[in-house]
Amino acid sequence: MYLLSVHQKKVTIELVGKEKIENKQKHLEELSSASLVYKGVVSAGELEGVLPNLKELDLTGNLLPDWEAVNLICEQLPALRILDLSRNRMQLLGNLYPALVHLHTLVLNFCQINWGQVEILKHSLLELEELHLCGNELSVFEVKEGHDYIDGFERLRLLNLENNHIEAWEEILKLSRLESLEQLQVSYNELKEIFYPKETGHGWDKRPFVSLRCLLLAGNAIDNWSSFDALNMFPNLMEVRVSDNPLTDLHVGGAPRFILVARLANILVLNGSDIKQRERKDSEIRYVHYVMKTMPRSEEEERVRIHPRFLELKKLHDLDEEQPYLRKDAGPSRMSDNLRTVTIVCVAPSMGEKAPCMKKLPLSTTIGKLKLICESLFKIKPSRQRLFLREPDVPVPVALGDDLESLSDVGVGFESTILVDEL
């Protein structure tokens, strides 16, 4: 094997580790994983004793006709724990498939399977911990007659329902009694609201979603703050993903990250990024500033209704209504108290490398005035500037889009950096 160089000379290619791979493939009894993607597999064949240690098998995009064939495959692979059957169209010909009992992970993405079929299969999946059902056009969860909730799946920790057509949150609530469920993925559905149920029903003494730690809700149609505030009621929820919803999509005027961090009291991971203690404190203080600026004190009841954590956070951080960026115990105001040394960095590609600039600015400086300062430093017209605020321990810089906001309003601290980009 060879490639031609830029001077049309042959350059020999050596496959590193070829002998090791070939030697490993000769000893099928030691093989722990195998992939037969789009290979036209229609049956189990004779596998008994051939792959005694195979733990993971990917059969995506094959031609398996029914669950009897799947059962036969599992029967001849005693160590199998992870099975991917995505893009197969298998008929259910019976009610029990005993060889599936040892599976821990089952992937059924794009299989045109409905929840009624899952209800039948669950009696054979007693040890299942992960179930993936993406892209199956699911919209409702059929439950047993006389029942309002889904039962069984006693060991199920992760349920992936992404890319379906679930619109009603009431359907998701049917999963609320799965005691072991820790991660629920419902991104890219059609959900419009979230709420936490007040009652769990008769014969149930535990809170709904008692073990849920991670809830992925990206790409839905959630457009009301009460839905996000409801996430504070989940007893053990620590991670959420809410990007690409109408309220959070920055491309259509959605809320910036600091508002989400402040409103979600117990969340430790937001949209895939850790919320460090420093970011939470800065976000909560900035959020209180934002509420006090956008809603006058005379509308106190409305403030509390729209911003349920406002009074709690105002008290927690000891913020004054008249001078929100000063602590009450700060003593007499000095000019130095209202100044911040800010690092300004130009990141516009067209400007090449520019040395960072340090400026000591009053907290009353508006974003509009800051753009004029940046123009004098980097020769970029204010109308062409995009400014971002970067804080230590905060993974994503925050866009500064309102020219009338002050440095105090946007929460500029003692270690803040302003990034200057060009449109």
Image (tube, helix red, strand yellow):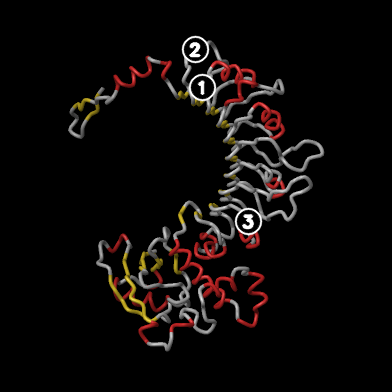
Along the viewing direction, whichever of 71 and 60 lies nearer the viewer: 71
**Of all residues shown, which one is farthest toward the right?**
146
Along the viewing direction, whichever of 323 and 101 lies nearer the viewer: 101
Query: Residue drawn 41% across and 80% down?
Result: 363
Q: Which residue is mark 3?
A: 222
Crowdedness near tag 2: few (<14), some (14–19) or many (≥20) residues, C-alpha within 10 Å: few
Tell me the mark number nearer the camera, choosing from 3 and 2. Answer: 2
Query: Residue drawn 39% across and 64% down?
Result: 423
Image position, residue 408 (x, y; %) = 45, 77
The amino acid on which the numbered mark 1 sits, given as a three-letter code, is Ala
Number of marks drawn: 3
Along the viewing direction, whichever of 155 and 382 lies nearer the viewer: 155
Question: Up-down: is 54 above or below 275?
Answer: above
Crowdedness near tag 1: few (<14), some (14–19) or many (≥20) residues, C-alpha within 10 Å: some
Crowdedness near tag 3: few (<14), some (14–19) or many (≥20) residues, C-alpha within 10 Å: many
Of callouts 1 and 2, the N-terminal one = 2
* C-beta proximity under 8 Å, tags 1 and 2: no
**Mark 2, secondary structure of its residue:** loop
Q: Which residue is mark 2?
A: 49
Q: Viewed as shown, does residue 15 lie left or right of 189?
A: left
Query: Residue drawn 24% across and 26% down?
Result: 13
Q: Which residue is mark 1?
A: 79
Of callouts 3 and 2, the N-terminal one = 2
Q: Viewed as shown, does residue 96 lie left or right of 252?
A: right
Question: Up-down: is 337 above or below 262?
Answer: below
Question: Up-down: is 324 above or below 267?
Answer: below
